[in-house]
Every structure is written in structure tokens, then in C-alpha cells.
Image (cartoon, rainbow, N blue to C red):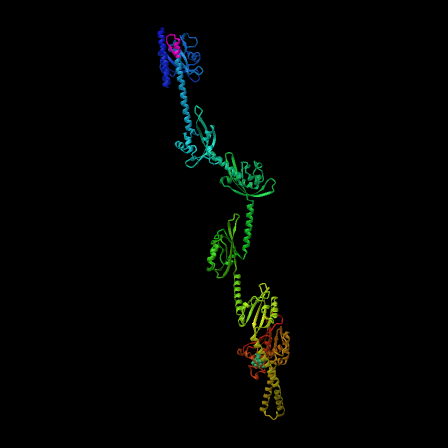
Amino acid sequence: MNPSSDPESDRHDHVRQQRVVADLGDRVLEDPDLDRLFRDATEAVRTTLGTDTCKLLELLPGDDRFLLRDGCGWDDDVVGSETVSATRDSQAGYTLGVADPVVVDDLRTEERFDAPDLLLEHEIVSGVSCIVGPTDDPWGVLGTHATVPREFDEGDAAFVRNVANVLASAIRNGRETRRHDEEAALADTIVETSPIGITIVDVDGELRFANDRAEEIFGRKQAQIGNLRYDDPEWDEVGPDGEPLAAEELPFPKVVETGEPVFDQVTGVLRPDGERVWVSINGAPVRDCDGELDAVVFALEDVTDRFDRERDLERYETIVETAHDGIYVLDEERRFELVNDSFAALTGFGRDELHGTHASVVFGEAFASIEADQTDVATSRRSPTFEESIVVGSDGTDTRTVENRFTIQSTEDGTRRIGVVRDVTERKEMEAKLRESEERFRTLSEHLEEVVWMTTDDPASLTYINPAYEEVWGLDRDSLYDDALSFLEVVHPDDRERVREAYTGLPEAEYDEEFRIERPDGERRWIHARATPVRGEDGTVDRIVGIDTDVTRRKERERALEESEQRYQTVLEHFPNGTIALFDEDLRYSLVGGQALGEIDLDASEVVGATIEEFSPDEIAPTLESACRGALEGTTTQVDVAFRERDWTVHAVPVRDTDGEVFAGMLMAQDVTERKEYQRRLEESNERLEQFAYVASHDLQEPLRMVSSYLGLVQDRYGDELDEEGREFIEFAVDGADRMREMIDGLLEFSRVETRGDPLEPIELDDSFANARRDLQLQIEEHDAEITAEPLPRVVGDGNQLRQVFQNLLSNAIEYSGDEPPRIDVSAHREGSEWVISVEDDGIGIDPADTDRIFDVFERLHAVDEGSGSGIGLALCERIVERHGGEVWVESEPGEGSRFSFTLPAADGVDET
Ligand code: ADP
């Protein structure tokens, strides 16, 4: 049915159609809801054209079917679900191929395409359809149909096409919006969930945006980040080398300056918690539509872990490469996987040579022990140390001692050995030497008399003390190890604090002390203790070595010396009745003293410094000088000189040092003025006595001879006329005259001992003894005396006088022997430069009270009838012995016998023993 053929009504229809299209176009701009648009559009088409149905088909993916997306006039259940073929033999599919609307007048006769089921079912006869969207990218098809045959004019077709265009444009808009929305949402998701930190910074440096990750990386909230400009010092940005970045090195200004992106700039940034985070920064410029720089977008990656690892690795590499120790890594087959320069140098191989070489080539024997212990190493995680000799290099000329320490590391690619090798050759040699020298030191000090000790740098911590300590100090060594200061307990209380202070002042202060100790056993000793700090190579003190010397002997000697000096001084000052003077090799007085100085009005200072020649008067100077020269040559000389109206006996004596060398001389002058006077008088009186004795005895002999001879005459002539008594009287008188003669002879002899003797000279005493014995032969036989004698020495003496001494002593011994036959023993023994000669008998003995008296002239202990002596024998002996410079004495007890002894100078020199 054709609703109208009237032109007026046609124009009216056309206007209406245009208004519908315009309305729909407005709707598209106002309301983005496509579904509502689709419904309204299909409804508007049906109503406007007065058709029965309208449909909007949407091409499905695959392009071979349409979905009945929307429509009206259809059965309820088909819209939204029914699909239609999109092949060219269907009306819809055919419509896709042409740009213009397709008009169908009668479907039943239509030849261009088949009627689809949907149209047939709804008894569709005619209609118009038009493509929605461009032919090269169609969205679908819009169509309207009638159940009765109907003619659609060009205006109708244009109307459908216009609506289809409005829809196409709405769809295109919607699609773009959706795509835009989706893209925006996706971008947001990406940005927000990105493992990469993203920030956008305005061209003026203000933060526009930061995502969660960026907040995490920087440890700051977006607002906090926004408060900081890119160049705020709080970021404390540094480069990979740890050096602060200059302003122009920062990523933001770099991008802004150059307009170029930055890639992977690793920068260290400080978090508020003080931790440094390492960030790989990628920055790109963002430009607005005019191409002007608008912002910079940054992608930030936290590379702290990676960076730390890399940096650690770099450091490890540096360590390994610069290490003085040799470092190696062995692979599972024990081949060198990695070695450093030091290792190569140590082994004498090149690095390349070692790579892939089996470890046994270097370690040899040592490697076997590594193999043996490997399970232990792996399980216990210990780092065993092996000390081995390795042969250096392939030529094998050099051998080094190394310390090889390694660990076993198991990784996915197998087991590795990582080792460090240290050349300890020098150290070992040093240690060996040190041990040796320490050993020597100990061995030596074990046998030393000196006390040797050692501490650390602290004197209170003793490390060694030798056995001499116990010997010298009388203390236990163990107690000293317990307490190095315990030795102080035996230090003399007066010295203790001084020693403690000096000892504990070590090693800074000097320790060199002499002190006394009182040992536990009561012995006192003197110790000289010294110590020296011993410094190591670095100059610090690493021990203190000390020595204690027992200086008791020296101290005693010093004291003795002091005493002797004192004595010497005393002697010098108080030298009685004389002077002492020391003179040097130039015969110059160096020291003068003695009591006599005062007496001759002489001051020591007048003498000291003068030479002997200068000081002595001319008449004695030569004598003294030659005596003093003799002293310097080692001889002792005695001279008598007169000086200042006095007589002096002067001894010039050599003064020797401890080696016996003469280094000075000494003059000892004894004032002998009085002695000389006395001697002179003695000599005079002796002379007078001798003269008297001689004269007396000589002159007495004549009248005595007269008495004797006239007594003889009386006896001869008148003997018979006299009675018994008269004859006895005469006998007494003769006896008395005889004794008197003996006494006079004895006295004469006594007076001549000094003046008529022979000179004293070496003689054999045996000869004198034998002569005396012969003279006494008669008496010996008479008394049946037995005389024993040992060989007698050579002495200096007068042989004749000594014969007389023996004769008197032997005669007395026989005389006073008592009733038994006399037993007499003669012996001699040496005493220094003299001989002591003894004559011992077993006779009647002498009372000790009388032993002095018997040596006096005419002293006798016994009555005349008991003995025949004259009482001058022992006095003569004493005078003879004294002339020889000796003495005579007796030891006796009454009834026990007597021993008479006398001394004589030996003839063989002073020093012989
Ligand atoms: P005499 O001529 O009387 O022996 P001496 O001078 O020889 O005189 O002795 C003095 C005295 O010493 C003697 O008279 C005697 O009493 C005593 N005398 C001397 N020798 C001995 C002796 N061997 N034993 C005991 N008495 C002695």
C-alpha cells in the first residue's frame, strides 16, 4: 500500500524525515547511550515510513553472521538473540557490499538474493536496507520492511541512509569513547600496579604525579615527594661511585636541558629512614600539542639489591685482584677455574697457564691431603689450614712454604673449592730463627750465674726466669711466675721502695739499681739489677729482658777497700814516730803524713808536689833519690839519713797495683834519734861491760891462780899433818877456786859474744851439732845418754857460737836428766824465714815460774852439789841467739822433761817454704 502519491504530502513527508534525522543527530551528541538510540532510531524509521518492522543488524566477529541487535515489529524473543546470515545471497549481506540503500519491491520475486527465514517468517514482502558504517569497515545493516507490497521512493531510501549514517557516527563515537575510556583505565591500572615507579614532573620542577611504587621506592608519600624539588638536598643524590651529583647531572635538568630522554641512570637517593636506595632512572620529555616541553615522566626501578650485589662483586673483584694472598677457585674436577695475580706470582705459573690445570700440578703432596679431608671439610664447614711446601713454577728450582686455607662450596653447578694461599716462607724462616735463638738464649741462660729474666712489655707479667734466680735470691721461681713483683719481699726494707719504683717504671724509665736482699735463709747479698726494653720492627716494646748480678763479692771488696783506705789514711795520719810519703814515677811527693811531721815543724802541704830532689837537703838528696828509684824498679832499700837534726831510718818501698806492677813508691821514715842514742849507750855499756868483764876476768885470773897454787902447796906439804876436817876444808877451798875459774872463763866468753864472734854467714847447722856432740863424748858415755836428731838446716850464723849453744843445751839435758839415762831429741822446723831448733829431754823439768830466770847470768835453780854448772850456760845461749836475730825459750813442767827452742834465720831466702 502506497500511503500517498500526493506531491504536497510527499514534501510534507520529506520534511518530517529530515526532522527525525536531525533529532537523532542531536541525541547522539547529548546521550551516549547507544542502546537507547538504537531503539528510538528503529522506532522512528518504522513510524516515519509507516512500515511494519525495522531492524538493526550488527556484524558479528568473523563477518559471516549478523546479530539482530535491535528493532521493532518483530516477535518478542528474536531481538537481541536472532542471527542472520551475512553472505551475499542474503539481503543484509548483499547490502554490505553496496554504499547505497537497497530497495526491495517484492521479496518473492527478488532475484539478487534469497529471502532469509526471519523475513519469511514475518511474511515480509518489501523493504529498504542500508549499510551502517563505511563499506571497508562495516558495523552492520539498518533495514525496514512491510508485509504488503510497497514502493519505496528515493526519499525513503535517503532517509534510511541518513539514519544509518547517524547511527554509524554514534557507533563510531561510542567506540572511540569506549576505547579511550578503556585505554585510560588500562593505563591507570598499569601505572598503579606497575613494579616500576612512575613520576611526572612539571617543566617547572613541580611533581605532578607519583605512583604507589614510586612512593615505596622513595619511602615518601606523594605529598611529601611533591614538597621536595628535584634538587632538594634531602634527596642526597649520589652517583654509582658514591660521589654527590652536581646539579646538571641530575636526571630532571638533563632531560629539560637536552629535550632528550635519559636511560638507566643509576642514582643513589636517601630515604627519610636514612637508608640509601639505588634507583635506575629512565626519563622522557612530555610535549603538549604545540610540541612545547610540558613535563618529564620518569620510570624508576629500585636496583638497590642489584647495585649492591654489583658493587660487592666489584669490591670482591678488587679485593681478589689486589690481595697479597694468592686466591684460587677449583672446579669440581679440581681444575683451576680462577686465580688472582698473587697466586700466579706465588706459584711461578702464568694465570693463563693455570686456568684449567689440575690443582695437583701446583699443590702436589699437599693436594692429597686436601682430597683426603674433603668430606670432613664439606660436612663440618670448617676452613682447614694446610701448611705445605710447594714447588714454584715448572722448572722446580724454588720451593716455598705456604699456608693453604680453603672452603668447599656446593652450588647447583657442582662443588667448588675456594682457597687462599699465603706465602709464609719468610715468616717460617724467621720463626725458626727466632725459636733457635730463643732456644740458645734459654740454654745459655740456664747455665748462667747471672739471673736472666724476661717479661712482656709489662714488667708485672713474667715470661721467663732462669734457675740462677733460686741460687742467687734463695727464692722459688714458681712464686715469681705467679707474681712478678714477689722478689721485692726480700729486698732490704731501706731499698725496697726505690727498687719497686724503678722496676714498675719499666719499660719507659731506666731500670739499673743496686740493692741489698735478705734471703729467706738469712743470707745477705748485694744485687745489681738492670733491664732493657726490646722493641719489635714497628718500634713498640714487645718484651723486657733483665739481668740480676750478684755483686756481693764486689761490694765486700769495695767495703774492704774502703776500710783499707780508711786504715791506710789512719796509718798515714797517725804513723807513729815517723812520716810516710808516696811519690810518683817522677819522684814527686803525692801524699805525706805521719806524726813526726808536727815534731819537726813540717806541714804536709810544703812537701806535696815537690820532687825529692827539690825538697831534700843536698847531703841526703842523692841517697834518697837512688833509694826511691830502686823502689820504682821493685826493690826495697833501707837508708839512714839525718834531717832537721834528727836521725831517720828510711825505707823506700815499691807500691804495686793488683797486677803486681809498680806504679809508685813509698818512703817510710822512722825517727830513730832516740833509738840510736839508746843503742849508742847500749853499745857503750856493752863495751864497758866487756871491758870490765875482760879486765875483771883477766885480772882475777892471776890472784885466783895464786890461791889455787898455794892451796895445792898446802895440800901437798901439810896434808898429812892435817886432821880429816882440815883436809876437807882444803878440798872445799880448791873446789871453790875451780868454780870461780869456770865462772870467770864463762864471763869472759859471755862478754866476747858480740865483739869477738865470726861474721854471720850461711853454714850447715849439722856441722855445729856434730862438733858439740864430739866435745861431749865423754859425758854422754858416762851418763849412757841417747841422743837422736833429724837432719838440721842451713842457716845464717856463726858456726862456732852455735856449736857452743848446742853444747850447753845438750850438756844441761844430760846434767838434769834425773835418775834415768838421759833421752834427748833434736829437731828443726821451718816458720816463715826462720828455723826453730828444739832440744828436748825427759829429765827433771823446770817450774814454769822459773823459766825466765834461768836465762840470766849466774842463775841456777839447783844447789852446787846437784849440778856442776856455773849458771852462765843459758845466758850465753841467749846472747848468741840474739846476736843471730833470734829468740830462745823453754817449755817445761817439773818431772815432765824440758824442751829448749831457739830460732835462726834460714840461709835460703825469705820466700822459700
Ligand atoms: P848451769 O851451769 O847451772 O847449768 P845454766 O845457765 O846452764 O847454768 O842453767 C841454769 C839453770 O837452769 C841450771 O842451774 C838448772 O837449774 C836449770 N837448767 C838448765 N838446763 C836444764 C834442764 N835441761 N833441765 C832442768 N833444769 C835445767
Q: Residue 610: image x %, image y %?
A: 57, 67
246 or 690, nearer to the observer: 246
Q: Quadrant of the N terminus?
A: top left
Quadrant in the picture for residue 354: top right
Magenta segment: does it hold 745? Answer: no
Q: Residue 6: image x %, image y %?
A: 35, 6
Magenta segment: does it hold 158? Answer: yes
How many numbered marks does the figure carry? 0
Q: Residue furthest top?
A: 6
Q: Residue 813: image x %, image y %?
A: 59, 78
Is residue 167 rendered to the left or right of residue 800? left
Q: Residue 143: image x %, image y %?
A: 39, 12
Q: Which residues are magenta?
A: 144-160
**As drawn, 127 above or below 790:** above
206 or 863, nearer to the observer: 206
Is residue 614 rendered to the left or right of residue 211? right
**As drawn, 160 above or below 471:** above
